[in-house]
Image (cartoon, rainbow, N blue to C red):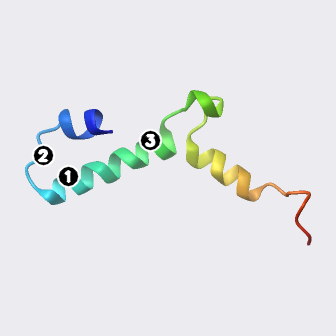
Amino acid sequence: MKYECIYLHALETGSQARAGVRQSMEIYNCRRPHKALRGQPPATVYLLEIEAPHPDQQD
């Protein structure tokens, strides 16, 4: 994130840096595919995990 967000953009203020980091995190977590997650973004995997019924949980 440091390279993709901070080093590639000439951020001048703290609010620009905050917005840039927020945008980079959104891309990384919601849109960017991850090889370890079979090409899915972490947010997708997380949502599928919390929505899936677990056999050890009682209704």
Q: Nearer the viewer, residue 55 or 23?
A: 55
- Distance from Cα at disc 3 to Cα at disc 1: 16 Å
Horizontal and vertical percent position of residue 35 = 58, 27
Q: Residue tagged by mark 2?
A: 11
Quick check: 33 above or below 28? above
> Which of the marked residues, 2 or 1, is nearer the chain's N terminus?
2
Horizontal and vertical percent position of residue 49 = 72, 52
For label 3, count other residues whose C-alpha is less than 10 Å away and answer few (under 14), some (14-19) or many (20+): some
Quick check: 31 above or below 50? above
> Which of the marked residues, 2 or 3, is nearer the chain's N terminus?
2
Residue 28, label in figure: 3
Residue at (11, 40) in percent of width and height: 10
Q: Residue tagged by mark 1?
A: 17
For label 1, count other residues whose C-alpha is less than 10 Å away and answer few (under 14), some (14-19) or many (20+): some
Q: Which kind of residue does numbered mark 2 sit on? A: Leu
Badge 1 marks a residue whose secondary structure is: helix
Residue at (35, 44) in percent of width and height: 24
> Which of the marked residues, 3 or 1, is nearer the chain's N terminus?
1
- Distance from Cα at disc 2 to Cα at disc 1: 6 Å
Quick check: 43 above or below 36? below
Quadrant containing the N terminus is top left
For label 2, count other residues whose C-alpha is less than 10 Å away and answer few (under 14), some (14-19) or many (20+): some
Q: Is residue 59 left or right of residue 25?
A: right
